[in-house]
Image (tube, helix red, strand yellow):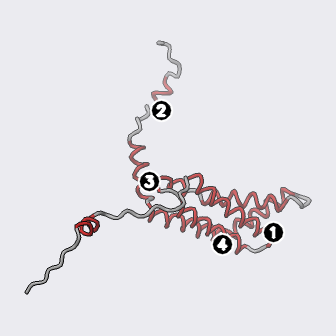
Amino acid sequence: MTVTTTRPASAGAASQKPRRPSPSPISLTGRGGVSVLFAFGLLGAVLSAQLHLGLIGGLLFAIGCALAAIGTRPADLLTLAVSPPLAFFAATLIAQFLAALGDTSVLQSLVTGLLLALAAGAPWLFLGTVLVVGITLRRGLPACLRDLRTRLAGTPKRAPADDLDADPVRWDV
């Protein structure tokens, strides 16, 4: 006696379809991701400057980096991947400027505070950058790089500089 089991047709068809990852509930543009990264960095830098605790600023920056990398849509990951150093610098500059406003020498306090904050925050900047690059690599950054390379290869070549500088004025109009 042979026992055979049959599967419903829908189960076999469903198992053959490739599954697509479910979209993230939040989809940020590249600018939105950079804004999230900057906002968390600025909040952390201001709190760090006011409370004199560098740990708060670094942790908030790292959390902002991770959230921005997770929430940014795949087409804009290249924009996000290159932005943590600039966002960190801008947030630190603004926070140190706000902290220096009450001092007698604002410029001296700003420069000193900025240099010390950047030096103290370098490990957190490195961690945030590694988080962004690591997360975006898994989410599709290589495809963004291939797309950029393809678009750049398709652009028309410019004339050599010697030809452009030979006669800058065209008289044969």
Looking at the picture, how far across and down is residue 159, in whole percent? 43, 31
Q: What crowding class fits label 1: few (fewer than 14 Cα within 10 Å), some (14-19), or many (20 or more)?
A: few
Up the image or down, 133 lies above or below 150; here it is below
Q: Look at label 2 and name its amino acid.
A: Ala
Up the image or down, 163 lies above or below 88; here it is above
Separation of residues labelled 1 and 3 (CA atoms): 39 Å
- Give SS at disc 4: helix
Separation of residues labelled 2 and 3 (CA atoms): 31 Å
Q: Look at label 4 and name its amino acid.
A: Leu
> Do callouts 2 and 3 mark residues in contact (Cβ within 8 Å)?
no
- Give SS at disc 2: helix
Q: Which residue is mark 4?
A: 59
> Quarter of the image holding residue 2?
bottom left
Separation of residues labelled 4 and 3 (CA atoms): 28 Å
Looking at the picture, how far across and down is residue 132, in whole percent? 54, 64
Q: Which residue is mark 2?
A: 161
Separation of residues labelled 1 and 2 (CA atoms): 53 Å
* Sooner in the amino-acid sequence: mark 2 or mark 3: 3
* Sooner in the amino-acid sequence: mark 4 or mark 3: 4
The answer to whether residue 151 is left or right of residue 69 is: left
Instruction: Say which of marks 2 and 3 sits in front.
Output: 3
> Quarter of the image holding residue 104?
bottom right
Q: Which residue is mark 3?
A: 144
- Give SS at disc 3: helix
Q: Look at label 3 and name its amino acid.
A: Cys
The answer to whether residue 4 is left or right of residue 79 is: left
Q: Which residue is mark 1?
A: 50
Up the image or down, 130 lies above or below 147; here it is below
- Give SS at disc 1: helix
Residue at image position (79%, 73%) is: 52
